[in-house]
Amino acid sequence: LRKPAASANAESEEDIADAPKDFILVPFVISEVEDLSVFRNLKILSVFDAATVYQMQTSSAITSSYASYGLGTTEVNFGSVINAMALNDLKDLSQLSNLSQLEVLSIEFTGIKDFDGLESFPNLTNLDIGSTQIKKLDGINKASKLESLMMSNLGIDNLSPLSQMITLKSLYADGNGLTDLESIKDLKNLETLSISNNLLKNLNSMNGLTNLTLLNAVSNEIEDLSGISECTKLDTLYLSDNKFTNLDALSNMSELKNLTVTTSQVADEDKGEDTSDTSGDVDSSSESESSEAEESVIPDISDEISSENNSEPDASDTSDETSSTGDEEEVEDKPEFGVLVDIKGLAGCTKLTTLDLTYNKIADISALEKCTELTDVKLNYNEIVSAKGLDGCTKLTTLEITNNKLSDISTLEKCTALTTANLNNNSIVDISALEKCTELTSLELNYNKIVDITAINKLIKLTTINISHNEVTDMTPVKGLNTLTKIDLSYNKISSVEGMEDAFEEDYKGTIDLTGNLLKGNAWEPLWNRIYEGAIITGIEPEPVDDTSDTSDDASSDNSEEETDESTVS
């Protein structure tokens, strides 16, 4: 045992107080396998946990990214970090043979190449071999009590050694080269299966896995979902980045609560391209591993360095895909995403609570009428014209339908529990249905065709409202909405703010953006008191100075003063 640096002192008093009585918290760093031999009654051994590895990868990638932009940051190599922390001399499980009481073993990023010595742990129930040098699963059946196996990023394409491991309840086989699941069709006790980033074209052989409650099959080449039609206990499904066009196979999944089927911008030719070794012998391959890891997690910081934003949207970014110059609206062409068209199968998913179908080609959402338990829905970047179907979703609290063709939102009058709604980038004209949604605190309606905003006057709980780039002429409906802290009515057709003198309480300190409207000169005077009370009003142009009697020097001075005027008064 070796005492670490001062920064790695013992856990806080709170951690110690929460520790079970039979646990000893040891503030030491173990770097040699032989140091572990003293812990003969050890039941849990984890070389690395997933959260720690991810944090190290991300942090290393950030330093690489900043260094590439010449920001003076010292680049940290992920492989070097792993080398410094890993049990580098762990090459064979027999080296841990004294730890016969082990129940949980995680040996990520070690030099283990096979399962020799696995028989030394008769009580083992949880095993993590991700990112090791193991290329075949032969011998894993020595762990006869195994309930959870994590085997991500190994490049394995054959699961046949698992065929008799009927005690397995959880299997994580992400980032391999799997093309079929025939070998695990008899693992009836499986409850959790994660097979993302493989080469699967279908989910055949899975219908016998009737105890499954969670399935993650993201980033495969799946064209047909019929193989899971009998997995009716499924509670959570992650199926993003695949090739199926409908959800008919889900029609009997009455227990399903969480469904995500989004599409990223990863080109088809890039998917599943290199499922071989992403880790393993840290000593010999740390440099290449670092490069691969950094490519996978490296953030794009160009926006922080350049004033131009050239980044493409991803499934988690539903910001408006628009640009504007002056009062002209320019909506960029939407890139093609996804192949999912038909969601009729969701009519049987009556317990569904969260749904994310971002970046697809869905036009009809009427099937959602039966999904009465929905609370969170994301349907961004589709081809939806009408909100018909959401009238049955009376428990809905969060709704996102940005970048569609939405014009009819009349059914939203039934969604009275809504607290957040984002309907940016559509073709909405009439928002009268929203006056019934009195629980709304945040409302986004940018880039539509709205003229009349009378309906929002009933939404007394609103804190944020964005209705920029529309055709609004009258802003008086915001009067009395004293909970508002942000009002964005920029790029509309407002020419007067008459009647706004007493729009808000005297101590109002919110932000009102009127940029790009028709307000000139003193037209903003009714809001004068709001300025002195702490509010911030942006976008109001000062009245031009008309004094032709000035000398040329005076005129020059006036011009200089005008140039220093700002459009923000606070």
Image (cartoon, rainbow, N blue to C red):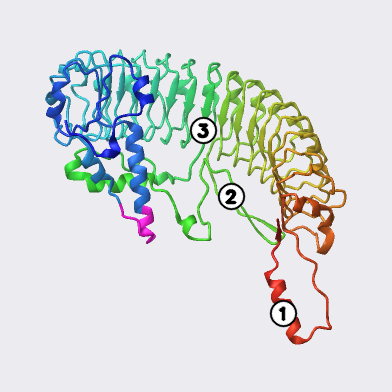
Q: Position of residue 287 (x, y in %)?
A: 23, 48
Residue stretch rendered in magenta on the structure: 65-75
**Callout 1 amino acid:** Ser
Q: Give the main secondary structure of the magenta stretch.
A: loop
Residue for badge 1: 557
Residue for badge 2: 334
Q: Give whichever of discs 3 and 1 has the lower sequence position.
A: 3
Disc 3 to disc 1, C-alpha distance: 62 Å
**Quadrant where the N terminus lies?**
top left
Disc 1 to disc 2, C-alpha distance: 48 Å
Quadrant of the image occupied by residue 398:
top right
Q: Give whichever of discs 2 and 3 has the lower sequence position.
A: 3
Residue for badge 3: 261
Disc 2 to disc 3, C-alpha distance: 19 Å
Q: Is residue 63 left or right of residue 365?
A: left
Q: In this rendering, does residue 297 appear at all?
A: yes
User: Which callout, 1 or 2, points to the residue nearer the camera?
Assistant: 1
